[in-house]
Image: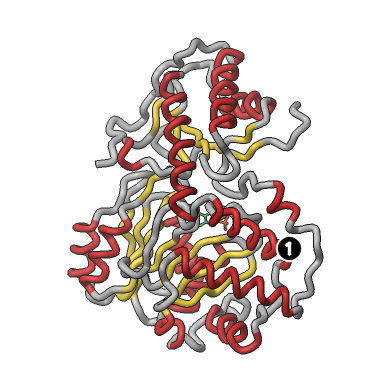
Amino acid sequence: MNSKAPYLLTPGPLTTSLSVKQAMLKDWGSWDGEFNDMTAQICQRLLSVAGAEQTHVCVPVQGSGTFAVEAVLGTLIDPDSYTLVLMNGAYGQRVGEILEYLKRPYMVLDKGDYVPPRGFEVAQLLESNPKIEQVVLIHCETSSGILNPLEEIAAVCAQAGVRLILDSMSAFGAVPVNMADLPCAALISSANKCFEGVPGFGFALIERQWLEGAQGRCHSLSLDLYEQWRHMENSGKWRYTPPTHVIAAFLQALKEHQAEGGVQGRLARYTRNRDRLVAGMRALGFQTLLDDEWLSPIITTFLSPSSESFDFTQFYALIKQKGFVIYPGKLTVADSFRIGCIGQLFDEQIDAVLLAVSHACMQMGMTVPVPAPNLLSPQLKTA
Ligand SMILES: *Cc1c(COP(=O)(O)O)cnc(C)c1O
């Protein structure tokens, strides 16, 4: 076993820098002015990354990303209005599950495991269902790694006069989003993905007018983002105990994000990681689930080779011995596994993981290049 902590090739929590971890060595009082100033700086910076300073407000909320999604849906959606959920994987399904819990009426466009929802289908649905007042889209559906066609869908929503709620959890910070051009009423993300902070809070960038009119809608006391926002506006403080160390680490992570060239810098490194990984894996005989057009620079799904000798549990353990943690797949149509490109990963780590993959295949008794995958679905095409 490698004595160093393994690199996480997972879509968050991910490998953070030493300086981000070191930012957590000090204890902060939640009533302290210096701490509240950190929160204000973070909110300001997040709005600026999205080009949303003029139109939106940033509201952070304690918990993991799902808490932020639930808080946004519960706070903003009028209980009598209809929502269209665009599903193509586990995170879209989770949005549906949350709406079930909240007893908010919704419709679904379910494209299965990895096929993208397209603008024309959304336009048709909105036209035949005028009751729909908001659409929820997952930006990068992390369960397959697909980058969904955001601009196309945002344009269709704007044309129909319907609000777009974007779960950009695993994309914001590395995939450009410019709210000045993009009609998007709410964007949700969290600390521990492309900004490379540690887990502990999520946040939403919400159109000021929508939030201002949302008093009293939320089903939950602690997830009420209207109240969280009002409290922060009035006092500068979080409503209940904030994740102080996580906030300090996130401010450091934001500085490093900016120093790397902001969204463009991060996108460039993640894209380079993804391209190097995919090229190397293809050279070893592995196939990606998705056509190149749909691959995100966040995480890539690879199909398992059709060999009696391939066993994911063993594969995972052998790669972990070399210092890398990969991710199991989440598909119903084919056996697969995922490898992430986000976090403190560079050429050196990508090359090392490729070497670890090739060694693992040989240790399991396979030849390299590995045999092609055995497709359970005859039509593994995204178009
Ligand atoms: C990570 C993620 C979430 C939130 O997951 P948590 O485990 O609650 O942090 C939501 N949506 C997407 C697309 C994600 O990648």
Where does residue 153 sit, x and y in percent of width and height? Answer: 28, 60
Q: What is the three-letter code of the residue carrying label 1?
A: His
Where does residue 5 sit, x and y in percent of width and height? Answer: 73, 37
Where does residue 41 sit, x and y in percent of width and height? Answer: 60, 71
Residue toward you, 366 or 39: 39
Q: Is residue 335 visible?
A: no
Which image quadrant is residue 127 in?
bottom left
Q: Is residue 108 left or right of residue 277?
A: left
Which image quadrant is residue 294 in?
top left
Residue at left 58%, top 35%?
Answer: 326
Residue toward you, 176 or 367: 176
Ligand 1 neighbours mark 1 (CB distance < 8 Å):
no
Residue toward you, 105 or 60: 60
Where does residue 286 sit, x and y in percent of width and height? Answer: 43, 24
Residue toward you, 356 or 141: 356
Q: Quick one: label 1, few (<14), some, or many (20+) residues within 10 Å?
A: some
**Protein image colouring:** secondary structure
Q: 279 above or below 15? A: above
Residue at left 31%, top 76%?
Answer: 133
Residue at left 40%, top 84%?
Answer: 209
Residue at left 70%, top 51%?
Answer: 19
In the picture, the quarter occupied by the C terminus is: top left
Q: 43 above or below 354? A: below
> Can you identify the residue that label 1 sits on?
245
Q: Is residue 114 visible?
A: yes
Asked which secondary structure carries label 1, the reply is: helix
In the picture, the quarter occupied by the N terminus is: top right
Q: 312 above or below 160? A: above
Which image quadrant is residue 213 in?
bottom left
